[in-house]
Image (tube, rainbow, N blue to C red):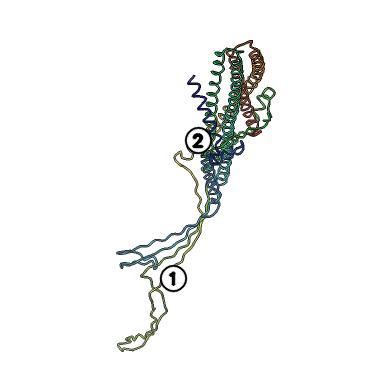
Amino acid sequence: MKFYTMIRFSTYCLVLMSLMPWSGNAQEVWPLRKCIDTAIKNNLSIQGAKLNLQSAQIDSKQAKHQRYPNLSGSTNVFWNFGRTIDPTSNTFTTETFFNNRVGLNTGMTLFNGFAINNTIKQSNSNVSAAKEDIQQTQNDIALNVASFYLNALFAKENLAIARANLEMSRNTMNQIQTLVKSGARAANEALDVEAQLAIDEQALLTAENNYTIAKMQMRQLMLIDQDIDVEMPGSVEMMTDPMLVEFDEIYRGALSTQRSIAAGEYRVKSADLGVKIAQGQKYPSVSVGGSLGTNYSNQGVRFDGTQTFPNELVAYLNGIPYNFVINQDVPIYSKAGYGYQFDQNLSYGFGFTVNVPILTNYANTASIEKAKIMRENAALNLETTKQNLKITVQQAHADAKAAKVKLQAAEKSLAAQQAAYDNANKRFSLGAINGFDLSNARTRLDNAKNNLLIAKYDHLFRVKVLDFYLGKGISL
């Protein structure tokens, strides 16, 4: 008796605490759509998939830029000692001098076995596969959230049933106490009803705890700290009858709606292009290039012109000296500056390069064979995904049909147990049965209610899984 009294006291304390006006603990009611959107927004797997998409997009952009010419600049600085050719004058010098060369180089591939075009197509396929991966991850998260959401709805409805059962037991307790006081019943008959009341009080505590845990699991899935309350749907539309829909229809729908299949197909296409890229290595490649450069040397000089100087010479003719003057032009040089040398030493040119692979020591053949293996592996992964999906759809279809049968049986059982309890309650009021018999009828009714609740949400979830594979979305 003391044990039952303690349970009732703790229950009353919990109820009073829940009624206290704590504005900071107000719970926001969240519909399923908001839960799904929040989980998708915060999910780390989605963020990782988006990073993979960004990487694939960068690869695609890089592949497209391979069509354009490249341009690079270079400069080098040398201190030369000993006998060395001065690059500005192309003459030998033994003096120590400083040299600086600046150049620009450009090049562009004209043909390389269609590798550039195929690489662009391959990178686009990889981008498409990455996008499908994101969509598949979002769909999986939506289905997972729906599962947890239905668990929370089950716990919330089970909590409402527990409260109703407790209220029913209290009414029965008041009824038996009235009958005992009037002498219509023996005092010991109240013990069975009091035991049932204690059981219901404990069931209420368990239901409250289960609902709290279900909401906590929802918060963990959405990665939020805010306490929430799930929204009870008024009526849930069942768009699919598992007894009427055929497996082939569900599987065809799943093949077209499950983005993992589309992602696998894009990866097979990418692998096909990988084979073509590897085969392109056997073709000759043609490229065009050009260069522009200039030099500077601290020994460089510039020609400033000439200066005429008279040069007296003596010539003898028949032993007789003759004096005459010849004007001689002497070149004048000065120190050449940086800018002057860069202008005067400027050189440029362009040309074509043809590279013909003749013997590559099995390298090209190995690349082709490896690319073919990767293609077969991609096709194998796609087929494995399809087979796994087929098994999953078969199981989901069978589970949905079994859930509907179980729900129909649970509804019949509840109707029968409700009628039995109503009859037992009338007989108890008339004194035809005692509190123990009424308690047993009540226990069977509670079990039938619980079984129906389980069957109801199991059936709802199984049907929503079929809707998911049929591409009808997740909604309540």
Check if mark 1's residue and mark 2's residue have beta carbons within 8 Å.
no
Q: Residue 339's mark?
A: 1
Residue sitting at the far top = 432
Could you tell me how many numbered marks the image carries? 2
Amino acid under label 2?
A: Glu
Q: Is residue 295 left or right of residue 19?
A: left
Q: Quadrant of residue 229?
A: top right
Q: What mark, if any, has residue 369 been given in the picture?
A: 2
Q: Look at 60% across and 39% down and name the residue there.
A: 34
The outermost residue toward the front is 182
Instruction: Name the foreground residue: 122 vs 2.
Output: 2
Using the image, tell me which numbered label, if any, was put on residue 168: none
Q: In terms of secondary structure, where does tag 2 sit? A: helix
- The image shows residue 444 at horizontal and vertical percentages of 60, 16
Query: Spatial distance from mark 1 to mark 2, Cα to Cα?
Result: 56 Å
Q: Secondary structure at mark 1?
A: helix
Residue at 46%, 59% (x, y): give it.
Answer: 73
Which quarter of the figure has residue 118?
top right
The residue carrying pointer 1 sits among few (fewer than 14), some (14 to 19) or many (20 or more) residues within 10 Å by Cα, namely: few
Asked whether 18 or 359 is in front, the reply is 18
Q: Earlier in the sequence, mark 1 or mark 2?
A: 1
How far from the left and from the top, in percent, is residue 320? 31, 89
- Quadrant (top left/top right/bottom left/bottom right) for the C terminus: top right
Is residue 279 visible from the viewing direction of this image?
Answer: no
For residue 125, which quarter of the picture?
top right
Q: Note whether residue 207 is visible.
A: yes
Q: Position of residue 111 (x, y in %)?
A: 55, 49
